[in-house]
Image: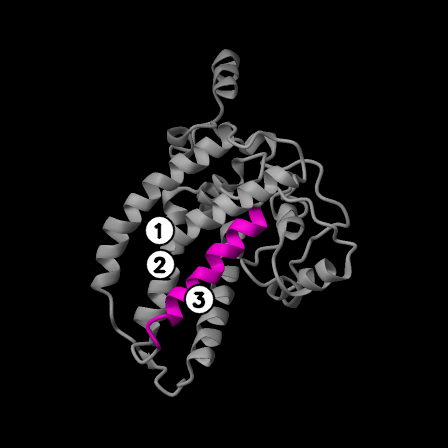
Amino acid sequence: MSGALLQGITMALFLGLGAAFPRQPQPLLGRHTVVNLATGAWMFLLRVTLVAWVAARTSVGLVDLGGVEHPLLQLLVSFLLLDLSRYWVHRLDHRVPWLWTFHRVHHSTERLDATAGLRMHVVDFLQLSAIPLVLFSVLLDTSSFAPWVLPAALGIGVVADGFQHANLRLDYGHPFWRAWDRVLNNPHFHAWHHNAEGHVRDGNYGNTLTIWDRLFGSDVTGPLPPPVLGLSADQQLDESVLGLQLLRPPRDAAVASLAEG
């Protein structure tokens, strides 16, 4: 199954579940969802052109992983390396001002649903695309791995992304979800990553596993969902596909700035 097909199925599934069991009332296809889908569409074109072209021409493999022979062990190694790398890159996106300039596009939505992972700046997209290329084509020689291993490791992240952004109401007092939260990402844990007061409560960077945040001291989860999502007033961006890519402030803020000038 291709990554694009898996992502489409995942988004459709969690959009549907979010509509049936919503954490907060919101339209199924509101403006925020349309912007997310439109952004994802042109990022997909970039993936199948530029990113695919680079991937086809990148093969160094400085460290040979031929000693990892069992496919399930190959999957475990690939998944853990990928998820840990994404954790640290994501943490840098929040802590390095230049990277945050672009990453805040993802945080500009004030409503979460399964499409929210598509909302990103092109710089963010290229950065995320580079992680598996650098790991599995430049640093590591995975040519001996079973052909399904790397797509499966990437696919786990795709499903986790759709689930964690979903507008799903779950009972986190239930033992099952409490146990899940100790290890795996979920809508409650990730909602705290999108809280509007990220400047004072910034964390929950993990993609699939929550253990990285607990291990490295970046777990900021509260007992209840955060009251407000999105960006602080001084960080907000225009709610349009082009406006987000140009990092343009909201139109009303731009007008107010001109009036003050």
Magenta stretch: dominant SS? helix
Residue at 63% across / 46% down in the picture? 191
Vertical placement of 146 versus 69: above or below? above
The answer, for residue 89, to whether it is visible in the render is: no
Whichever of labels 1 and 3 marks the residue nearer the N terminus, that label is: 1
What label does residue 130 carry, if any? 2
Q: Is residue 161 magenta?
A: yes
What number is the disc on residue 153? Answer: 3
Residue indicated by mark 1: 126
Please rate how many residues cluster around mark 1, counting C-alpha atoms within 10 Å: few if below 14, some from 14 to 19, many from 20. Answer: some
Residue interval drawn in magenta: 146-165
Asked whether 241 or 104 is in front, the reply is: 241
Name the image quarter holding residue 137: bottom left
Mark in front: 1 vs 3:
3
> Marks 2 and 3, how far apart in space?
15 Å
Question: For the residue labelled by badge 3, is the local secondary structure a helix, a strand or a loop?
Answer: helix
| Amino acid type, callout 1 | Leu
Disc 2 residue crowd, few under 14, some 14–19, many 20+, Cα 10 Å: some
